[in-house]
Image (cartoon, helix red, strand yellow):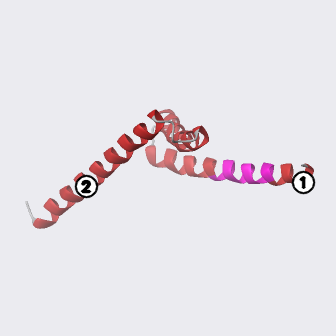
C-alpha cells in the first residue's frame, strides 16, 4: 500500500465518522423535539426521491441528475406559489 491509498482510506473513514455523528445528533434532536418537522421533510424528500428513481431507473447517475432537476423544479414551484400567495394575502 502506498501513502496515497492509506490517505484515501483515512479520508473516507473520517467522512464516514462525520456522517455517523451527524445522523446520531440528528436523531437526538428529533427525540428531544428540537427540530421542526418541515426541516425533516425537506431533508428526507430528496433522499427518498433518489432511492425511488435509482431503483426504478437502474442507473444511479441518471437518477441523481433527475433528482436534482426535479428538486430544482419543486423549488421554483414553491417560490412561484409563495409569490402568488403574497399577492393575495
Q: Main secondary structure of the magenta part?
A: helix
Instruction: Please state if 74 lies on the left or on the right of 86 as rendered.
Output: left
- Left/right of residue 65 with respect to residue 70 in the rendered view: left
CA neighbours of label 1 inside 10 A, class few (<14), some (14 to 19), many (20+): few
Per the image, is 21 magenta? no
The residue at which mark 1 appears reads as: 87
The verdict on residue 78 being magenta is: yes
Instruction: Count neighbours of disc 2 (C-alpha within 10 A) and say few if under 14, some if 14 to 19, many if 20 or more.
Output: few
Q: Position of residue 55 (x, y in %)?
A: 47, 33
Kindly identify which residue carries mark 2: 14
Mark 1, secondary structure of its residue: helix
Q: Is residue 34 left or right of residue 27?
A: right
- Residue extent of the magenta highlight: 72-82
Q: Are marks 2 and 1 in contact (CB under 8 Å)?
A: no
Does residue 7 appear to the left or right of 84 in the view shown?
A: left
Image location (x, y in percent) of residue 40: 54, 40
User: Which is more N-terminal, label 1 or label 2?
Assistant: 2
Task: Judge by depth and name the residue closer to the eye, 27 or 12.
Answer: 27
Is residue 17 or residue 3 the one in the foreground? Answer: 17
Amino acid at each position: 500500500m502506498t501513502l496515497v491509498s492509506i490517505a484515501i482510506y483515512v479520508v473516507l473513514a473520517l467522512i464516514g465518522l462525520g456522517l455517523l455523528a451527524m445522523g446520531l445528533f440528528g436523531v437526538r434532536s428529533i427525540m428531544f423535539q428540537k427540530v421542526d418537522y418541515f426541516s425533516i421533510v425537506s431533508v428526507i424528500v430528496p433522499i427518498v426521491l433518489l432511492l425511488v428513481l435509482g431503483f426504478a431507473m437502474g442507473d444511479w447517475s441518471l437518477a441523481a441528475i433527475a433528482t436534482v432537476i426535479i428538486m430544482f423544479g419543486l423549488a421554483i414551484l414553491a417560490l412561484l406559489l409563495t409569490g402568488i400567495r403574497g399577492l393575495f394575502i
